[in-house]
């Protein structure tokens, strides 16, 4: 129910322009109802009026959720949006067009899509319509072939179309309709477009619009279409949305090291025609229930955020323009892999012709150096850092305002802070004793303050459980300090860690102390103040055919007061720094 960004500064400080431009109707209706209520129960007062205004705005702002404030332009980028003739898809198209993108509305009804296209003309960018019926694998293949034939480079693929709680129906191939359309249709479409998205080599994004309903999903690989049980439309929808997140997770795994980022998201509870199979359009649905839901524009915000600003995250699940909490079931790597295999079989994906990612495991070193999907931790709210710095004059980081800061990392904290906590707590007790005597309340308050202050000072603690088996990490300056502790952590995750240090004896000592942590640790000579040494180090890695997955440029010299560094050009190609 609660998403962490509701506890963040940006939620209260940003997006108000968009909010007020979108909400006049809801705010007016709610405010008038509040006034009417006051009038009926005892008379309208100025205080009552102000309180009503405040509450109405606060409640609607909360319901509107995260609003994307990115100013990114998408000129020169092509976006495919499935199911873009109405609802969230259409509003996503409108936003991306305003950013200058070329948007392809991939819809099953040509007339509805043409109507949408006409209403989007003049928004900017370029909008076109192509036929795509996700409930027919032939239509998916034709659509993909059309893009390839017309040599269209897709930069952003938004798998948005969805069927919600329809009665039992089947796709052309005989799959249950919700799983067939929401998951299998998009699975095939993505796989058919992937080779071209990788080939063009430009940064790309794949966005799967899932739903919070995935929390109730259960993937039964022996009965993916619920044919062995009585049909439950809601369960089937939830399963298909869980499949979206599992698909995203597997895709992220297979695309590691490429320039393609993947996202799954929950758009929020949105007024749209999604409920057409459950509830027909009535005054109650359109004007009363809608007061408690997001508008379609608000529902499109997280998709837009993922298309513009978001960075892929190991949680694989976004909500309200921030990283959300994915259901545990979606984190089952084995299930994600098995579902991928089953889906590939069902849609008859020719994995020879369409390898999910042949290049993944042999990412060339250049990519590995330039790209770094933060799988093994990293703060979700990096994007807020700049803003918070501006506001708090460099004193507060936004993750201190986030839920995770208060709920996670306590084990690590207490195991690391015994000394500091004991000293500070003893000092606090001594102080109490000196100024007037120790009391139970005083002891409790001291403990609370000491823990709070040290927790604040300790800052963000990485609670990722990601394994790095099979990955090679180079850490410069890893014989002491932060570098050595980073090495220890990554070794425990199973990585092969190379301590790149300038002093062989010191590095050897560090290596010995790290033996037994797990993974594999080795030492290589690297003196960053000598370019020849840097070249030799890199050449050594290449010669030994070592694939580097993570490069941590950690070494640093701080305030070297008496050391005079002189550049001496020894030859035209080599520089030696002494
Ligand atoms: N609305 C919500 O509260 C909510 C909450 C969570 C998640 N979502 C997800 O958000 C996405 C968009 O939903 P929405 O609210 O915008 O719903 P919507 O207004 O009903 O739009 C759904 C779109 O999907 C298209 N579609 C359905 N079956 C298709 C098929 N076989 N081939 C191609 N297109 C097909 C529809 O086309 P037609 O118009 O031709 O039928 C329509 O364009 C869905 O994936 C939905 O599951 C929505």
Image: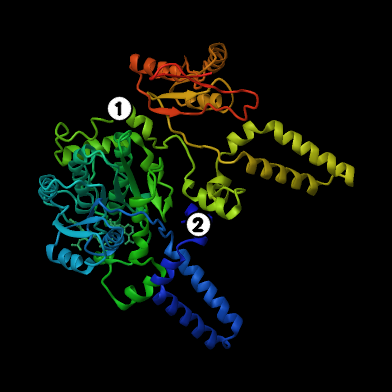
Q: Nearer the viewer, mark 1 or mark 2?
A: 1
Residue named by callout 2: 10
State how far apart marks 1 and 2 are (Cα). 38 Å
Query: Which image quarter: residue 332?
Result: top left
Q: In this view, does 407 lie to the left or right of 346?
A: right
Where does the image place residue 234, in percent across and percent down from the top left? 30, 56
Which sits in the foreground, 362 or 224? 362
Circle 2 residues within 10 Å: few <14, some 14–19, many ≥20: some
Tell me which label, 1 or 2, sits earlier in the chain: 2
Check contact, mark 1 vs mark 2: CB within 8 A: no
Pick the residue in front: 534 or 83: 534
Mark 1 Cβ and ligand 1 under 8 Å apart? no
Q: Where is residue 72 in the image (x, y as percent from the top left)?
A: 36, 54
Q: Can residue 520 be seen in this view?
A: no
Kindly identify the residue that appears in the image at 68 percent across and 32 percent down: 418
Rendered image quadrant of residue 471: top left
Residue 353 % position (x, y)? 14, 34
In-front residue for pair 516/220: 516
Q: Which colour scheme is used?
A: rainbow
* Left or right of 446 in this view: 142: left
Classify 60 as above or below 521.
below
Element assignment for label 2: helix
Question: Pointer 1: what residue?
Answer: 364
Residue 411 makes an appearance in the image: yes
Please tell me which residue is depicted at 43% across the width and 51% down the height of the picture: 322
Rendered residue at 62%/48% (across/down): 395
């Amino acid at each position: 129910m609660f998403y962490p960004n509701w506890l963040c500064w940006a939620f209260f400080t940003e997006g108000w322009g968009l909010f007020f431009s979108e909400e006049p109707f809801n705010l007016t209706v709610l405010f008038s109802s509040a006034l009417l209520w006051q009038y009926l129960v005892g008379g309208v007062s100025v205080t009552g009026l102000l309180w009503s205004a405040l509450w109405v705005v606060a409640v609607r702002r909360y319901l509107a959720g995260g609003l994307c404030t990115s100013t990114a332009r998408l000129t020169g980028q092509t976006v495919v949006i499935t199911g873009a003739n109405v609802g969230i898809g259409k509003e996503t198209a409108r936003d991306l067009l305003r950013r200058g993108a070329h948007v392809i509305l991939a819809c099953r009804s040509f007339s509805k899509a043409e109507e949408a296209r006409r209403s989007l003309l003049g928004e900017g960018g370029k909008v076109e319509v192509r036929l795509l019926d996700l409930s027919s694998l032939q239509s998916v293949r034709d659509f993909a072939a059309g893009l390839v034939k017309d040599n269209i480079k897709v930069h952003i693929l938004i798998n948005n179309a969805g069927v919600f709680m329809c009665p039992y129906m089947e796709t052309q191939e005989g799959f249950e309709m919700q799983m067939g359309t929401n998951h299998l249709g998009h699975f095939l479409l993505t796989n058919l477009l992937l080779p071209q998205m990788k080939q063009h080599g430009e940064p790309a994004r794949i966005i799967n619009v899932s739903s919070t309903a995935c929390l109730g999903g259960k993937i039964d690989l022996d009965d993916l279409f619920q044919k062995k049980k009585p049909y439950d439309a809601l369960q089937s929808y939830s399963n298909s949305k869980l499949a979206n997140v599992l698909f995203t997770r597997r895709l992220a795994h297979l695309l590691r090291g490429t320039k393609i980022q993947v996202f799954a998201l929950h758009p929020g509870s949105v007024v749209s025609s999604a409920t057409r199979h459950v509830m027909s359009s009535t005054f109650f649905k359109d004007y009363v229930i809608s007061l408690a839901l997001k508008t379609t524009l608000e529902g499109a915000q997280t998709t837009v955020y993922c298309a513009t600003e978001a960075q892929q995250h190991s949680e694989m699940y976004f909500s309200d323009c921030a990283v959300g909490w994915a259901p545990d079931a979606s984190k089952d790597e084995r299930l994600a892999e098995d579902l991928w295999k089953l889906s590939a079989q069902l849609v008859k994906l020719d994995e020879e012709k369409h390898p999910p990612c042949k290049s993944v495991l042999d990412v060339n070193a250049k990519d590995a150096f330039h790209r770094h999907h933060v799988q093994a931790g990293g703060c979700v709210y990096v994007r807020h850092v700049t803003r918070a710095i501006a506001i708090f004059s460099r004193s507060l980081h936004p993750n201190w305002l986030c839920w995770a800061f208060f709920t996670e990392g306590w084990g690590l904290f207490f195991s690391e802070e015994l000394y500091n906590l004991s000293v500070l707590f003893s000092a606090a007790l001594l102080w109490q004793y000196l100024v007037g005597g120790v009391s139970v309340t005083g002891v409790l308050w001291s403990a609370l303050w000491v823990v709070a202050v040290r927790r604040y000072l300790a800052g963000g603690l990485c609670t990722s459980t990601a394994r790095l088996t099979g990955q090679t990490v180079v850490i410069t300056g890893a014989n002491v300090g932060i570098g050595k502790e980073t090495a220890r952590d990554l070794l425990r995750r199973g990585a092969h860690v190379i301590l790149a240090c300038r002093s062989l004896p010191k590095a050897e000592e560090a290596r010995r102390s790290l033996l037994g942590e797990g993974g594999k640790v080795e030492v290589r000579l690297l003196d960053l103040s000598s370019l020849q040494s840097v070249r030799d180090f890199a050449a050594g890695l290449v010669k030994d055919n070592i694939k580097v997955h993570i490069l941590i440029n950690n070494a640093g010299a701080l305030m070297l007061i008496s050391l005079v560094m002189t550049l001496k050009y020894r030859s035209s190609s080599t520089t030696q720094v002494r």
